[in-house]
Image (spheres, rainbow, N blue to C red):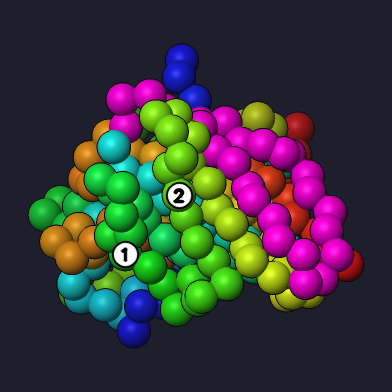
């Protein structure tokens, strides 16, 4: 069964450093998403991406964040200058259309020291 | 207004019992209400979903009850099994205006053998 994959599973970085989280969505899906879950809190929407551009973003997704689909398979989330409060589990998701089920990857745990 | 409130935070049920998790929302424009199941180390996976044109949806041991006037919906797990032990999230989406899922806080369900 096709699945969303994410790398790395755990990323440790120093405050102020740039990180790139990588995702490979399901191959015939057209919509891509990033969510995050701070430990012990709810899953929060960050951004959705369609046709090589951001279709929706939340208040959390400020200028420190960017997304890109650098090739036909990868979907990345870049955090330009990490802060302690960026420590969270980051989930990538994809869906075939905007109305279909969103399939989530296993997540990348980001720890900012 | 975008919030989804979920209760209880944790739930312990005996094998064979009924697990009930409740959610409430404020945004009357929400028109899609999924429940996600998350096992440790995995991303959320869609369990069952409902749209507000029906009051109940059943899939196997899992039932969503939906009360549009009260702006509440709940997940019932019949004949709960130890393998159902996981974190359950309700969510809501305003399909006509975007694809973002707004999640509840999550319920950690433990089913004792």
Q: Residue furthest bottom?
A: B1
Question: Marks 1 and 2: in contact by CB < 8 Å?
Answer: no
**Secondary structure under badge 1?**
strand
Q: Residues in magenta? A: A4-29
Pinpoint residue A76: horizontal percent, then vertical percent: 53, 46
Residue that mark 2 sits on: A68
Q: Residue at x 78, y 45 (%)?
A: A10
Displayed quadrant of residue A38: bottom right
Pinpoint residue A51: horizontal percent, then vertical percent: 25, 45
Residue that mark 1 sits on: A56
Looking at the image, residue B97 lies above or below residue A2: below
**Secondary structure under badge 2?**
strand
A112 left or right of B38 in image: right
Displayed quadrant of residue A100: top left
Verify whether residue A15 appears in magenta: yes
Looking at the image, residue B61 lies above or below residue B38: above
Pinpoint residue B71: horizontal percent, then vertical percent: 27, 73
Quadrant for the C terminus of chain A, please.
bottom right
**What is the chain letter for disc 1?**
A
Tell me if mark 2 has few (under 14), some (14-19) or many (20+) residues whose alpha carbon lies within 10 angstroms of its own: some
Q: Residue at x 14, y 61 (%)?
A: B96
């Amino acid at each position: 069964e096709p699945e969303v994959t994410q790398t790395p599973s755990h990323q440790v970085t120093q405050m102020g450093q740039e990180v790139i989280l990588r995702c490979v969505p399901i191959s015939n899906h057209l919509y891509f998403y990033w969510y995050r879950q701070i430990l012990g809190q709810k899953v929060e929407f960050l951004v959705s991406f369609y046709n090589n551009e951001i279709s929706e973003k939340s208040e959390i997704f400020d200028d420190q964040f960017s997304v890109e689909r650098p090739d036909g398979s990868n979907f990345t989330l870049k955090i330009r200058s990490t802060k302690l409060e960026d420590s969270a589990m980051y989930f990538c998701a994809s869906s075939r259309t905007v109305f279909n089920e969103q399939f989530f990857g296993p997540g990348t745990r980001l720890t900012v020291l | 207004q975008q919030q989804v409130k979920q209760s209880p935070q944790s739930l312990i049920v005996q094998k064979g019992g009924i697990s009930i998790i409740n959610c409430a929302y404020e945004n009357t424009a929400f028109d899609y209400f999924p429940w996600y199941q998350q096992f440790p180390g995995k991303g959320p996976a869609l369990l069952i979903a409902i749209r507000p044109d029906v009051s109940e949806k059943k899939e196997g041991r899992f039932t969503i009850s939906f009360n549009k006037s009260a702006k509440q919906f709940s997940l019932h797990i019949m004949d709960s099994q130890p393998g159902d032990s996981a974190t359950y999230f309700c969510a809501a989406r305003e399909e006509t205006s975007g694809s973002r899922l707004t999640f509840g806080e999550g319920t950690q369900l433990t089913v004792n053998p």
